[in-house]
Amino acid sequence: MSRNLKLTVILAALATVAVATLLVVTRPADSPAAGAAGETVPAEVLVRPDSHRLSTAADGKVTLVEFLDFECEACGAAYPAVEQLRKTYAGRITYVVRYFPIASHPNAQLAARTAQAAAEQGKFEAMYMLLFERQAEWGHQNTPQREVFLGYARELGVDLVRFQADWDSPATEDRVSRDQADGQRAGVRGTPTFFLNGRPLSPQSLEDLTRAVDAALAS
């Protein structure tokens, strides 16, 4: 087997593992899953006017919401599947991201504030992608990763003075806290947690996720 072929096989295997761990959530063992009884969560709890929409469907028929933690390894593993889903259903579904930093992750709160500070300059999606694609650089470090995150902001070309002011502003902290409060209201106990048209969704693979979305589109 050639070196290039071996590398291709390894990368394919890693991608398979990432998709297979789509819903290996960060959740205390004794905590119930969100919406355990399958109740529909009110739309106004799951999607606020200022919620971050990474994809938008004009007809508004199907909305998929993810409560995530940028430091969560399971969220990082789910990220490639989510990106594939966004490409497959571009323009056909609305995809919404909500912050839900887990207290046991030392830089989760700071990462959420980093994404929100970037959002204030129209760079949420770009920062969202950087935080997941480079999670191994900063995740699970015991010290605040401010310099790493500042480097990402510099790479995105934002106004660094404004970025740093937004980073630590009460408004940014409140924005993250409001997402987290909505998640708790919806029954979220860990990440990633998905809701499809208001109902909790527990996919075990990308195929599960696409089947659920296909069914919602066809209904």
Image: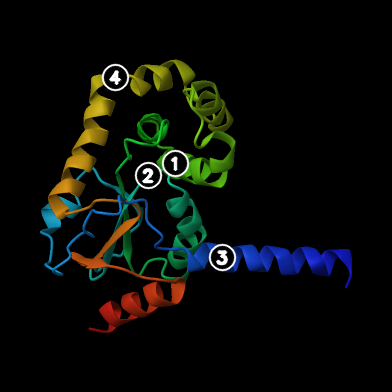
CA–CA distance in space, label 3 to label 4: 38 Å
Query: Which residue has dot 2 on it?
Result: 69
Q: Position of residue 29 (x, y in %)?
A: 30, 54
Query: Which residue has dot 1 on it?
Result: 71
CA–CA distance in space, label 1 to label 2: 5 Å
Query: Which residue has dot 3 on it?
Result: 17
Q: Residue at x 44, y 15 (%)?
A: 161
CA–CA distance in space, label 2 to label 3: 19 Å
- Residue type, mark 4 in image: Ser
Q: Quadrant of residue 100?
A: top left
Q: Residue at x 33, y 67 (%)?
A: 93
Observer-side mark, 2 or 3, equals: 3
Q: Position of residue 41 (x, y in %)?
A: 13, 60
Q: Quadrant of residue 119?
A: top left
Q: Residue at x 42, y 22 (%)?
A: 163
Q: Residues within 10 Å of mark 2 (few under 14, many from 20)?
A: many
Query: Which residue has dot 4 on it?
Result: 169
Q: Quadrant of residue 105?
A: top left
Q: How is the image coloured?
A: rainbow
Q: Residues within 10 Å of mark 3 (few under 14, many from 20)?
A: some
Marks 1 and 3 close (CB-CB < 8 Å): no
Q: Residues within 10 Å of mark 1 (few under 14, many from 20)?
A: many
Residue 38 visible from this viewpoint: yes
Marks 2 and 4 close (CB-CB < 8 Å): no
- The answer to whether residue 147 is left or right of residue 115 is right
CA–CA distance in space, label 1 to label 4: 21 Å
Q: Which SS class for mark 1? A: loop
Q: How many marks?
A: 4
Q: Position of residue 123 (x, y in %)?
A: 44, 37
Marks 1 and 2 close (CB-CB < 8 Å): yes
